[in-house]
Amino acid sequence: MNRRSFLTSSSLVIGGLSLSSFVSAAYAAETSNPKQLFNAENPLLLNFNENSLGMSSNAKQAIIDALPHAFRYPDDARSALISALGEEFKLSDKHITLGNGSSETIQAAVQYVANKAQKAGKAAQLIVPDPTFNYAELYAEPLGVNIVKVPVDNTLAFDLTAMQKKAQAFDGISMVYLCNPNNPTAMLTPTAALTNWITSAKENVFFIIDEAYAEFVTTPEFTSAIALVAQGYKNLIVTRTFSKIYALAGLRVGYGVAVPEVISEVDSFVSIDNTNTAGAVSALASLKDHAFVAYSRKSIDVSRQMVVDTLNALNIEYAPSHANFIFHKVKGDVKTYQERMKAANIMVGREFPPALGWSRLTLGTPEEMSYFVATLKEFRTKGWI
Amino acid sequence: MNRRSFLTSSSLVIGGLSLSSFVSAAYAAETSNPKQLFNAENPLLLNFNENSLGMSSNAKQAIIDALPHAFRYPDDARSALISALGEEFKLSDKHITLGNGSSETIQAAVQYVANKAQKAGKAAQLIVPDPTFNYAELYAEPLGVNIVKVPVDNTLAFDLTAMQKKAQAFDGISMVYLCNPNNPTAMLTPTAALTNWITSAKENVFFIIDEAYAEFVTTPEFTSAIALVAQGYKNLIVTRTFSKIYALAGLRVGYGVAVPEVISEVDSFVSIDNTNTAGAVSALASLKDHAFVAYSRKSIDVSRQMVVDTLNALNIEYAPSHANFIFHKVKGDVKTYQERMKAANIMVGREFPPALGWSRLTLGTPEEMSYFVATLKEFRTKGWI
C-alpha cells in the first residue's frame, strides 16, 4: 500500500485521526515518498528520529534555486534565516545563534561555560539526567568537565530536585543540560517545575535547554523555555533544530535562542560561516511552509496513535510520547530485540542505559508504522515481545 | 561580451594562455554564468576569494539527486567523501577529518592544542605571520591563548627564522599557523624551508598548515605538507577546502589531513555530523570532476595573466601570485581605493595591516577581470592609481 492509497483507506483512520481529513490528497501525494519495499539492503530506518516524510517541496526548490549562487559564502542566506527566526519568536536577530545542527549550538554552549569557569579559575561540571541525549557529555568530556549523571525517577521523569541539589552543592560553575521533550523517553518535563528552577537558580548555574522536539508537542501544558529568554533571563540558552519536524537532518541547521549578551559569547565558539547555503535557504523555506509543518505534525500524531494502540493491545508498557518517537519496553534484552527487528528489515533505536529493557522507536510515516506494527504483532505470536 | 564570445575572441588570448584552446566551447558554455551587468545592486564581487565560475554541473546534479534522502543524517555521504579523500592522497580514512569548511578544522586544531596545553598545566601560544588569514587567531583568542604576530619580511615573505625563535623561546606549547600560499599575499613559502622547520621542531610545537589555495599552485617547486603526514610526522595538520578551486564556499566543506592519532584528537573538537549532505555529495562529485578542476585552474591562470599584464603596463607593484587572488599596491590609502572601486561597481578585498597600501584582489572569471582591468586603466587616467 503506498501513501496515497493509505490516505484514502478508511481502515487506517485511527483514533479519530486521519491525514486525509486534514490535508488534500494532492498535497499528501506531493510530499509522499514512492512506495518502499523493505529488505536487508533497504531496511526501514526507525533508529535516528529522522522524519521519513522527507523535506517539503518548497525546501527542495529553495535549494535548487540557490545552487547558481552557492559558490559564494553563505552570509546572505544565514542573515535571512537569523532574521526570520528572530521574528518567529518576536525577538531580535541578536537573540539567535545559528548552528551546524543544534549539536554545534550545544557544543558551543558547553565550551562557553567551560571557558568561563576556566577564566574564573573555577571548576566546571555538567549535570545531566540519565538517560538523555549524550552530545553535551561528548563535548564536555574532552574539556575535562566533570559529568554528573542523575538517574530519572521510577516514572522515567527527570529528578529535578536531585539535580538541583547537585548544582547547589557545587562551588564552581554548573551547566545543566535538559532535553524537553527528553530523548529517548519523549516525555515532557512540567513547565512550572523547569521555570521554577531556572528563575530561582544562582548565578553559577547555566541551563542548556534542548528543545529539538518541541514542534511536535501539542499539549497546552508545555511552554517553550524561549519565554524565559524573552523575559530577559541570562542563565539559559534554548537549542532547536531543523532536523526533526522540518526533515532537514542532512542539511545541518540548528539554532540557539538566548539573550544577546549570551549569544555573542556563545558565537565566539561556533565555526565562522557555520550554516551552509543549502541548509539556510531550505530552513527558511521550511519555516514559512506552515502547511508542511502541520502535515508533518499530523502525520506523527497518526503514526503515534497506531503504535500506541498496538502497544496497548499487546499490553506493552510505554512512556507518554510528545515527540516523533516512543520509548517502549521489550521482553528480554534490547540487543536481541534489535537483532530480530533487523532480521525483519527494521532498524530500531538503541538501548539507553540505565533504562534497560526499553527501546526507542522512531515514528516514521503511517505507512511505515503499519509495517512496523504488523511485525511487532508477529513478534508476539512468536513470544518474542 | 559574454563568456562564450570571450573564449572565441583572439584579442583575449593572453601570454600564451587561452581557455578556448584548453576546453571545448561546449564545456565552457556549460559552466559559464549568463552575461552579468554590474551595478550598485549587483556589483562585481572580487573581495572574498570565491570562485566566480560557480560549482561544476556535476556537483549541482549530485545535490539535486541527494535531496530525496537529505532528511536523513549525513553519515553515508560523509563516509563516502572521507574515503575518497583518503584515496586521493593515498592515505587512509583515519588520516582525514571533515570540517564545516576548513575553518572548522582550523578551529578544532586550535582547540586541540589549547586543550592539550591546559591538561599539561602549560601555557599555549599561537604564532602567526602578519599579515595572514586571521581565523586561527579568532578561535584562539576566546580560549585565552597568547597570540604572537611575526611580521613578514620586506619581500612580503614569511620570516620563518623569527617565528622559529619565538617557538624555541617558549616553555609551553606553541601552535604555528602557516597559510601556504598565504592569504592575502598569494605567495608561496619555499617547501624546503617549511619542511626543515616541521621535521626539526621540538615536541612542544604543532603546525597548522592551511593549504586552502594549494590546488591553484602550478609550480613544481611546491610540495604539499601532506607529504609530511604521509611520512608519519605527528606535529602537523594540513587543512584544505572545497570553497576555492571547487567553488563550493556556500556548501561549507573542508578537511584536515594528519596522522590518525592527531585526527582522532582533533575530531573530538568538531561538531558531530559536521558536514552536510549537500556539501558532502557535491564535494565528492567535484573531487572526481577533473575536467572542472582543470578548467577552474586554467580560468584563474588566464585571469591572473590579464591582471599581471595590466599591473605591469601601469607599473603597479604586486606580489607573485600562486592562488586565485593577487596582492597589489594602490596609490594612496586602500580605503579610498575601495570606495572608488565600489563606485565603479567592483568590490575589492580589504586592507591587511601591517601591509598598508596593498589591496587583495580576487581573480574572477576572465570576463569579470576584463571589466576590472578596464576600470583600473580608467583609474590611472584619473590619477587614482
Image (tube, coloured by chain):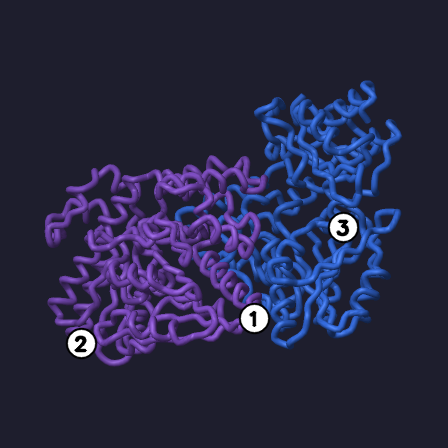
Chain colours: A blue, B purple
Which disc is residue B382 wearing? 2
Report the Cα–Cα distance between label 1 and label 2: 60 Å
Residue linked to disc 3: A181
Q: How many marks?
A: 3
Q: Chain of mark 3?
A: A
Q: Chain of mark 2?
A: B
Mark 1, mark 3: which one is toward the viewer?
1
Classify mark 2: residues with Cα within 10 Å, few (<14), some (14-19) or many (20+).
few
Indicate left or right for B15 with B238 as reference. Answer: left
In which quadrant is the C terminus of chain B drawn? bottom left
Indicate left or right for B270 with A197 as reference. Answer: left
Circle 2 sits in a helix, a strand or a loop, which is it? loop
Indicate whether B126 appears above or below A84.
below
Looking at the image, which is closer to me, B275 or A285?
A: B275
Indicate whether A128 appears above or below A317.
below
Amino acid found under the numbered disc labelled 1: Gly
Residues under numbered marks 1 and 2 in contact, where contact means CB atoms less than 8 Å apart: no
Residue A281 can be seen in this image: no
- Tell me which residue sits at (64%, 32%) in the image: A45
Indicate left or right for A162 with A296 as reference. Answer: right
- Tell me which residue sits at (18%, 76%) in the image: B382
- Tell me which residue sits at (76%, 23%) in the image: A374
Looking at the image, which is closer to me, A93 or B229?
A: B229
Classify mark 3: residues with Cα within 10 Å, few (<14), some (14-19) or many (20+).
many
Report the Cα–Cα distance between label 1 and label 3: 40 Å
Task: Place residue A33 in its image quadrant.
Answer: top right
Which disc is residue A38 wearing? none
Amino acid found under the numbered disc labelled 3: Pro
Residue linked to disc 1: B121
